[in-house]
Amino acid sequence: MKRREFTFLAGGIALETALGVGQPARLEAAAGKADFTLRIAPVSVELAPGQTIRTIAYNGSIPGPVLRMKEGKRISVDVFNDTDVPELVHWHGQLVSAEADGAEEEGSPFVPPHGHLRVSFTPRPAGTRWYHTHAMAMDDLTRGAYSGQYGFLLVEPKSQPGNYDQEVFLAGRHWDPVILHRGAPNNDWTVDYKLCSLTDRALGHGEPIRVRQGQRVLFRILNADATRQLNLALPGHRFQVIALDGNPVPTPKAVDLLTVAVAERVDAVVEMNQPGVWVLGSTRDEDRKIGMGVVIEYADRKGEPQWKALENPTWDYTVFGSQAKVPQPDGKFDLMFMMLPDEGKPFNRWTINDKAWPNVDPLMVKAGKRYRIALHNGMEDGHPVHLHRHSFELVSVGGKPTAGIIKDTVNVPRNTTVEVDFVANNPGPSLLHCHMQQHMDYGFKMLVKYA
Ligand SMILES: [Cu+2]
């Protein structure tokens, strides 16, 4: 029997339902083929010989396909959900409508189980973005960011600068999660993992990245993890950081270590001037041992991949900033993040200004105004805080002023305050949350609302 297909033309969203339940008032025939298709379905991936993960992913691979879109050119994506549970696809770092954003809390529709949703939006701004599930996992570690539902989305600028010879996409991930209770000083519930990947295979398996001496390689690096920070080095080489979260930085700078918090992206160019076979990998020995890395192989070089620990690994956003004067905001908010004590089962609950979702008071803003948010982390863990549908500018990190660094996710280190400014320029509810899955699932989220 032919599937019934309907299109719901409102807010840029088209909704099709196979059952016809909850049919919206305005129905029209689905219009042609979408520009992109994503299929959410189970997959098995052999990360290393004998080490196969079974997860849910896009189009049968981890990561999903690199989606290349043109800045400002409206597109449509057909999302098919072959699983038994409702899903959400979030377009991370893009200034889209709340309907298209893929966040339940903003009112975006789900992709129904064994159903379909057509999403339409205008990609912007240009840069390294990504897409991922925004479903909650709670204590089901097969769902949400613990699953394989992530992929790069590159919004290509109208005019391409492109001063590189090769482009490489790397997305860090931990796999096979298990719930773990930690003792002092944290005394909390956390997640531990047994396997890692930075490509579609564990370190030492799959194809190396082949380079030639003198090449400039642009690495687009994403931390697609549910909970863990990614720290990367490439012995004998430096990373010229040119963009953070896809946005060009005011002061590109060469560094030895890349620290990428959950959901962040770093674009960095490496000049290949140390012929050999190297490990580009996690600076955490335990993570490299279980697969977090990839081999870089120069032409005509053979042998065991070499690793060397960094002597002085440091990471500081502000080195990429400028000294420009940041405009005074029209309003200011203070947000204090705290963890509630262990309640005897996973996970600990989290509060923002002493309240947990859904009871956190929203930040009320007026369109066109500039707001400063002081993010206060009163705990031992760092929190990658993400604001949906807006970009923000870093104003200070741990009391150190900066300017010109535009991001959508910022790591707020332990017992530190980070200040960010954003302009309320995209009306509709916008989610602000910690991107660590168990933190957002257990209270650490709130809405920005337009008055
Ligand atoms: Cu957090």
Image (cartoon, rainbow, N blue to C red):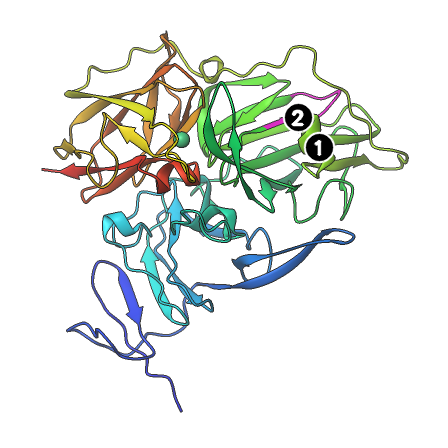
The residue pinned by badge 2 equals 284
Amino acid at dot 1: Arg
Residue 333 visible? The answer is yes
Residue 216 visible? The answer is no
Q: Which residues are magenta?
A: 231-238
Query: In the rendered view of the protein, which quadrant contains the C terminus?
Result: top left
Q: Residue most toward the left? A: 451
Magenta region includes residue 423: no
Above or below, 40 relative to 170: below
Above or below, 320 relative to 264: above
Residue in the image at 34% along x and 78% along y? 18
Q: Residue most toward the bottom? A: 1
CB under 8 Å between discs 1 and 2: yes
The picture quadrant for ligand 1 comes to top left
**Is the residue at mark 2 in contact range of ligand 1, meaning its CB lies under 8 Å from it?**
no
Which one is in front, 210 or 230?
230
Magenta region includes residue 234: yes
Tell me if 52 is positioned left or right of 451 in this view. right
Amino acid at dot 2: Arg
Mark-to-mark CA distance, 1 and 2? 6 Å
The answer to which quarter of the image holds residue 65 is bottom right
Location of residue 354 in the rendering, given as x and y in whole percent from the top left corner? 23, 26
Location of residue 272 in the rendering, given as x and y in whole percent from the top left corner? 74, 27
Q: Secondary structure at mark 1?
A: helix
Residue in the image at 37% along x and 20% along y? 404
The residue pinned by badge 1 equals 288
Tell me if 254 is positioned left or right of 330 in this view. right
Q: Residues within 10 Å of mark 2 (few under 14, many from 20)?
A: few
Q: Secondary structure at mark 2?
A: loop
